[in-house]
Image (tube, coloured by chain):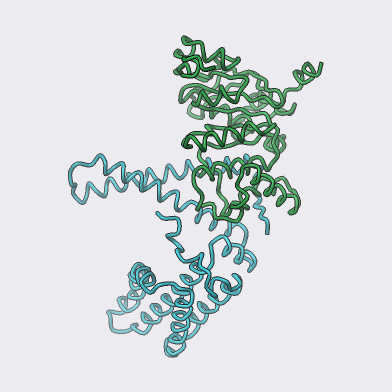
Chain colours: A cyan, B green
Amino acid sequence: MPRDFLDPFSRGSTICHRLPDRLKLIMVLAVIVAAMLVPAAYWPVHGCLAAALFLAMSIAGIPLRYLLVRLLFFLPMILGLAIAVPASNGFARGWDVALTVLMRGTLSFMGVLWLVNTTPFDRLLVAMRRLGLPQTLAAILSFMYRYIFVVFDELQRMREARRARSFTRRGFFAAWQSNAQLIGMLLIRSMDRAERVHGAMCARGFDGEIRTLE
Amino acid sequence: MSSTVSAQNPVLRVAKLSYRYPSGQLALKDISFDVQPGDRVGLVGPNGAGKTTLLLHLNGLLPGADAGVEENASAVEVCGLPATQAHLREIRKQVGFLFQDPDDQLFCPTVREDVAFGPLNLGLSKEEVLRRVEEQLAAVGLSEIESRNTLQLSYGERKRVCLAGVLACDPQVLALDEPTSNLDPRARRGFMNLLEQFPAAQIIASHDLELILDLCSRVLVLDQGRLQADGAPEVIFANQRLMELHGLEVPLSIRYGQR
């Protein structure tokens, strides 16, 4: 996985990238809160938020194509969630709730997408810390961002090794059985790595308390 | 006279160290050796000989706190302190450990934060921490990447940042697990030159026998958890029978008389 897969535009130099990190974080939180609090009946507010976000995206130089691809992954999930309400009412009522969920979810997603693509993650973590995010949560996020690439690359290598030894196209069941084995193996390897990382932390004096330069 | 004084004060003393893995399999048996300040000692042996397990004992990562083998823990002494749970903090300050895979050791988002991790845990002031970060990154020749994200570094750069992070704790002893594996020849040579500069005592576990010939004045041969030989690399590596018995090979430079 390319190292900039999660936030390919975060190291730009537009006005959006140069805004103070904390200000950006607060702005995006405000957008999310606004989207959550305003009822669907006041849809012009949502429309304005969407327009503002769209404007911010284009100022930050984030291409439309990228947004659409990300939305393509996000929308099915939020659609599944949104459809649950009308579905539980026999598709007679609840469409307004579904629409609200859809609007709020998409606006929040877009806000966060803008934030991570205008702020490198290490700086975002510092900004969140300064706004009162507990140290332990910040450390968990930091480790997640650091190791998601390592774990994914490990999965890629395992898949390649499997492909190199697969000669026939196999049935659906056999394929999923082998995927399950792969995932199980990845879990074990990740646990081993966690042991080694913890060892490396202890070796440099870690005693359970996280200390940072901030 | 001074040599006799230092011979009485080894920076590291291992006396009759034995260890069994939790599975019950014997990993180390009756290992004893001393390391004097400033010594560079090679540690060679086949895969599975116990090299990494031995290194992990040197700064108290093994045996684990739950192992309940206090008599074992005191088999290792660093600067005169037995490596028991009570002295763990001091032991880890004195012994720096360079892991084989830099991805295990480089866990902070930026280079600066990672090198600062050890000094911060030592409780140093922010100014002192930043001074050490700058100093050690300069020492490994990477001053210009201080604010870079650790994900964006090459393998060789990551390895050197790891070394800077260990050195920033100012250890008396460096334990290095395969320091040059996966490095290309130029990066390997650069890394060896770095190791040669550092005054701290070093224990280098490696399959790279030429590296040990270049850097070390002494080598330990470990096989099946036992110390099989201890002496000058030129002498031990030239002993073909001993080398082949323990899954090793006489280095080409010795075989063709280049040493």
**In the image, what residue occupies the spot 70% across and 47% down?**
B132
Residue B171 percent location from the top left of the image: 69, 36
Residue at 43% across, 49% down: A151
Q: Quadrant of the C terminus of chain B?
A: top right
* Image location (x, y in percent) of residue A179: 30, 48
Q: How many labels does the image show?
A: 0
Quadrant into which the N terminus of chain B falls: top right
Residue lying at the far right of the rendered structure:
B1
Vertical arrangement, residue A59 with respect to residue B246, above or below: below
B49 vs A138, left or right, is left
Residue B158 at x, y percent in the picture: 54, 45
> x, y (%) of residue B43?
56, 23
Is residue A203 visible in the rendered structure shown here? yes
Does residue B159 appear to the left or right of A41 in the view shown?
A: right
Q: Does residue A207 appear anywhere in the picture?
A: no
> Observer-nearest residue: A34 or B149?
B149
- Would you place residue B197 above or below residue A170 in this image? above
Q: In which quarter of the image is residue A44?
A: bottom left
Seen from the viewer's position, the closer of residues B180 and A68 is B180
In the drawing, does residue B218 fall left or right of residue A165? right
Q: Give me the residue at 56% from left, 36% from top.
A: B190
Q: Which of A120 and B120 is in front in this view?
A: A120
Examine the rendered structure and indicate whether residue B154 appears above or below residue B9.
below
